[in-house]
Amino acid sequence: MGDDDDGDIPQLSSHTLAALQEFYIDQRQREGTKISQEFKQYSVGSIEEDWLSQFWYDDETALCLANEAVLAAGRGGRIACVSAPSVYQKLKEQDGKDFSVCILEYDKRFSVYGEEFIFYDYNNPLNLPENLIPHSFDIVLADPPYLSEECLRKTAETIKYLTKGKILLCTGAVMEEQAAKHLGVKMCNFTPKHTRNLANEFRCYVNYDSGLDRDSSCSECT
């Protein structure tokens, strides 16, 4: 009776088997490409936006903010990106220029960038490595992950600890009063845009004379 049961097992057609084999080959190739990319530490763009929890700037905005940070930092300057991964990746595209950059980020995927990555949780704003010297960055560019007074206040502690003076903050327009209170920054004319439309209007804030304040477009930054 056991032999008779074998005839009840459905058999795949040659066409279906060929399609299935092609699918598995494609999957293996995709996995191989993914693994290869993971070993390229400075492969710009290899880390993508987490659709469920992250809102990254569109390409033009990220480039504009990166260029602004380079100009503000000056030759040989140091730039810190706090919770601003898309700007960090644009800065890495300009790696040959005379500046250095690090990223403070909760997303541990960015650890592939080695020593430039610093794990950061805004709930513990001063829980930073001992070798991260206070007031050692020419500019700090920050994008607090949440539109709340608590998040901005705690992120502000980190910013003030890191910066020599210059601050470029990106957050909601509704945070204008709190941004001025905690960081002494003012809203710029430039309006950042994201890869996905946000419910809340987003703006940039600075505490220095910035090209972002001259125009609402990126023309001054490119």
Image: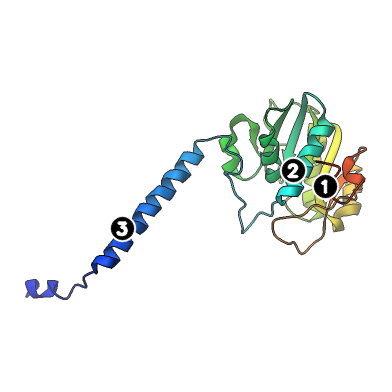
- Mark pair 1, 3: CA separation: 49 Å
Do the residues under discs 1 and 2 have CB atoms within 8 angstroms? yes
Q: Is residue 4 above or below residue 63?
A: below
Q: Residue 218 got which mark?
A: 1
Q: How far across and down, in percent of the image, does residue 86 sit?
A: 68, 45
Q: Residue 21 bears which disc, if any?
A: 3
Q: Residue 184 sits in which quadrant?
A: top right
Q: Position of residue 181 (x, y in %)?
A: 91, 47
Label 2 element class: helix
Say whether marks 3 and 2 touch (CB < 8 Å): no
* Residue type marked 2: Leu
Q: Amino acid at mark 1?
A: Cys
**Upstream in the sequence, badge 1 or badge 3?**
3
Q: Which residue is mark 2?
A: 63
Instruction: Say whether residue 195 is visible.
Output: yes
Asked if residue 217 is positioned above or below residue 137 in the image, the reply reads below
Marked residue nearer the N-terminal end (3 or 2) = 3
